[in-house]
Amino acid sequence: MLLQIPDVLTKDDITRVRGLIDAGEWVDGNVTSGPQSALAKRNMQLAETAPQAREAGDFILQKLERTPLFVAAALPLKVFPPLFNRYEGGQAFGNHIDNAVRRNRAGDLRVRTDLSCTLFLSEPDAYEGGELVVEDTYGVHAVKLAAGAAILYPASSLHRVEPVTSGARVASFFWIQSMVRDDAQRALLFYMDLAVQRLGAELSLGHPSVVSLTGAYHNLLRMWADV
């Protein structure tokens, strides 16, 4: 499931995050690459241990927790601390699939990468190129969202970032270990959750149909969740 999540950050939030990360230490993006990804990746990355990365990452995690669409779609169990990258001057990231497991630098966190997420921190008109291109069973999808919006997609997807030919594309990226590792099961729960919310708004939360559908949702989650 490929899902756009608008307005994770407000304009003021973006100003705050960019003020932090733009002043940080940026290094070669291959510091977090595996051997295969390093062959295709050309970008800059905010040092994972930089205090600005930690502060900005914690702030983004707080905002994600308050974004119902993200929580409903990802059903997060663990979220890898957000990282930050910048593409400019023709930099790009060729076709790749994210590593199945990510560990932080300290080695005290290990996350199974069920989902990948990119949170855009530059407006689309601030740079040329730089589309995130995700390939799945339904075709090829090019994504370039407004600053503050995020795209959520299975980490098993083949994807790339097109060359940035002018300006700078700045984004946060991270991975989620979901309570439900299977993408099809997670999508079914997500659409059922949306249906419960719509039906509850049309009828009432206490209506027998809403209660029954809510029970079915939680019984499926109980059956599939790995917590």
Image: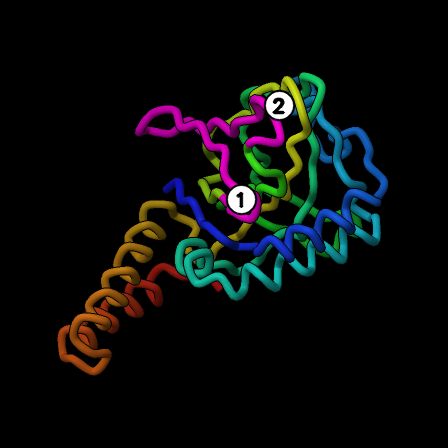
User: In the rendered structure, which amino acid carries the disc numbered 2?
Assistant: Phe
Q: Which residue is mark 2?
A: 93
- Indicate the secondary structure of the residue bearing disc 1: strand
Q: Nearer the viewer, residue 2 or 98?
A: 2
Q: Nearer the viewer, residue 95 or 170?
A: 170
Tell whether label 1 touches label 2 (CB within 8 Å).
Answer: no
Identify the residue at image location x=45%, y=49%: 5
Identify the residue at image location x=54%, y=50%: 176
Left of 55 or right of it: where is 10?
Answer: left
Find the magenta span and give its range. Answer: 125-150
Locate the N terminus and report the quarter of the image it occupies.
top left
Crowd band around label 2 with a 10 angstrom C-alpha radius: few (<14), some (14–19), many (20+) = many
Q: Which residue is mark 1?
A: 117
Left of 106 or right of it: where is 119?
Answer: left
Is residue 96 inside the magenta stretch?
A: no
Specify the quadrant of the image occupied by residue 209. bottom left
Q: Nearer the viewer, residue 47 or 18?
A: 18
Crowd band around label 1 with a 10 angstrom C-alpha radius: few (<14), some (14–19), many (20+) = many
Identify the residue at image location x=30%, y=62%: 193
* Residue 192 locus on image (x, y percent): 26, 59
The image shows residue 77, relative to residue 118, as above or below, that is below
* Residue 9 locus on image (x, y percent): 57, 55
Q: Nearer the viewer, residue 1 or 220?
A: 1
Left of 118 or right of it: where is 55?
Answer: right
Q: Earlier in the sequence, mark 2 or mark 1?
A: 2
Left of 216 or right of it: where is 98?
Answer: right
* Residue 7 locus on image (x, y percent): 50, 53
The image shows residue 102, relative to residue 93, as above or below, that is below
- Going by the picture, which residue comes out furthest to the left? 208
- Indicate the secondary structure of the residue bearing disc 2: strand
Point out which mark residue 71 bears: none
User: In the rendered structure, which amino acid carries the disc numbered 1?
Assistant: Cys
